Amino acid sequence: MNLLAAVFSPCFLGMLTLHVVLHGIPLRNRIFFYSAMAFPVGAGVCSLILFFAYLICPSQGKFLSLAASLLLTTALLGYVISRNARDPLSSAEALPPLAHFQKIDLQNKRLLAEILLSLAGLFLFLGALFAVIQFFSLSTPLNVWGGWDARFFWSLKAKFFFRSPADWQGMFSPKLFWSHPDYPLLLPGIQAWGWHWLGRESLIWGPVVSLGFYVSCAFLLVWYLRAYVSSATGWFAGTFFLVLGPYLFWSLQQYADVPLGFFIAASVLTLTAAVRSGQVRLFCVSGLLGGLAAWTKNEGLFFLAEAAVFLGIYCAFRGRRKARDWKPLAWFAGGVVLPLLAIVILKVFLGTTGEYLGPKRALHDYFRLLFGGWDRTSLIFQAFFVHMTSFTSWKGTWIIFAAGALLRSLKKITGADRCAWIVFGAVLFINLGYFLTLHLTPYDLKFQIQTAFARLLLHSGILAVAFGFEALTLILPKSKGQTTS
């Protein structure tokens, strides 16, 4: 089978999955939402299908993983078709943007200016997108296997899936301790799934997957800011993301941090949309995205715990203290179930190492690392400052984020403003978690900062862009029909 079909299949599966879950609920900019989420969600689902297929019948894992994904796609498509046959109006729910073209009043100069600004942003975004895809395609042949993690962690595990299905659990052998046997398997899973589809270990599949996640990050910002601020803000934020060097660099290296950053940002922004709208099924999608973050890297598991704590607090303080107040947490948990089950099986029954919480470390070891002196804390603070203020890398992202927080704090807080603070809080708590984690690292702290710190900021950078661009619209005059939060 060809490469285009291999890319289309998870995209179509992801779109159908989202459409079935979110059918019948109002969702702003649904087309852009699907554009951002389809490939990552579909890739995550295919990865989970492959993992469980190998658990059930390893010798037939290749066939089962492909057959199950195709059967699931067929079942979801049949459900959508049959439902639309019963309710023809539901088939048009994904096309609301087309209706707005009939309502444009070209005599309204302010509205015309907004349309022209939006078109300028669109063309700028498309130009930047074309440029980075061209650069990506020209750079990939120079490093087609990616960086260290891609070569020796993700590709190694994918080869166990592809080359020796019956013995795939050999990837968890203590002899391969350097390959982190307890790491989650989203990237190896989707890489092996693609190889099964193509019938060979294709060199191009890894870069294609990495590019798919990278482009999805840009469309995620476009969706959220178009939906809750303005069309122009969405396009400009997407363009700003595409000029950030760290995301493009680590995508070329095929590291898992860009996919993880996508899933974390998508989970938080979907959760924010759910709180704004009160649509509980959006909490389910947010839970699925958070679960896929945990299935991508260990840091995603920390994020999932933070998200669950936040939702628990949100539900506890909703005011009415009734059972239905806990529905958001229940729907979120429903989305998490399958990825979390895979992680539990991996960590408890398959993985053989633990890096931070292990039996060889006593309680006083953690206490000593956390409160062992100012030197350790000072070094971590310096790392945050140096990396965040690097204009070459981040183009002022964190300055925009801080300025947005300052401006928003000076504005009277309304219901919509409280929702926007969710994004700010997520950025704050993600980095606070890494601040504490660096204190607990069993490795040399300077070595850890040199090798991993730049990538840790990727996990919250997309959210920082979203919050900064949303908050800075406060300095602009608000027009009729514009939705600021």
Image (cartoon, rainbow, N blue to C red):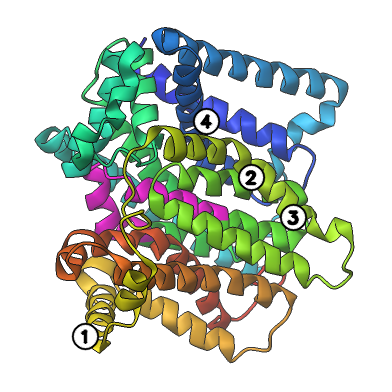
Residue at (45% x, 41% y) in the render? 295
CA separation in Å, label 4 and label 2: 13 Å
* Crowd class of label 1 (few under 14; some 14 to 19; many from 20; radius 10 Å): few
Residue behind mark 3: 328
Disc on res. 45: 4
Asked if residue 20 lies in the magenta stretch, the reply is: no
Sequence-first disc among 1 and 3: 3
Q: Amino acid at mark 2?
A: Val
Tag nearer the camera, 1 or 2: 1
Residue at (28% x, 76% y) in the render? 384
CA separation in Å, label 4 and label 1: 44 Å
Sequence-first disc among 4 and 1: 4
Q: Is residue 92 above or below residue 57?
A: below
Residue at (15% x, 70% y) in the render? 446
Q: Quadrant of residue 255?
A: top left
* Crowd class of label 4 (few under 14; some 14 to 19; many from 20; radius 10 Å): many
Disc on res. 375: 1
Q: Secondary structure beneath disc 1?
A: helix
Q: Are marks 1 and 2 in contact (CB under 8 Å)?
A: no
Q: Amino acid at mark 1?
A: Asp
Magenta residue span: 241-267
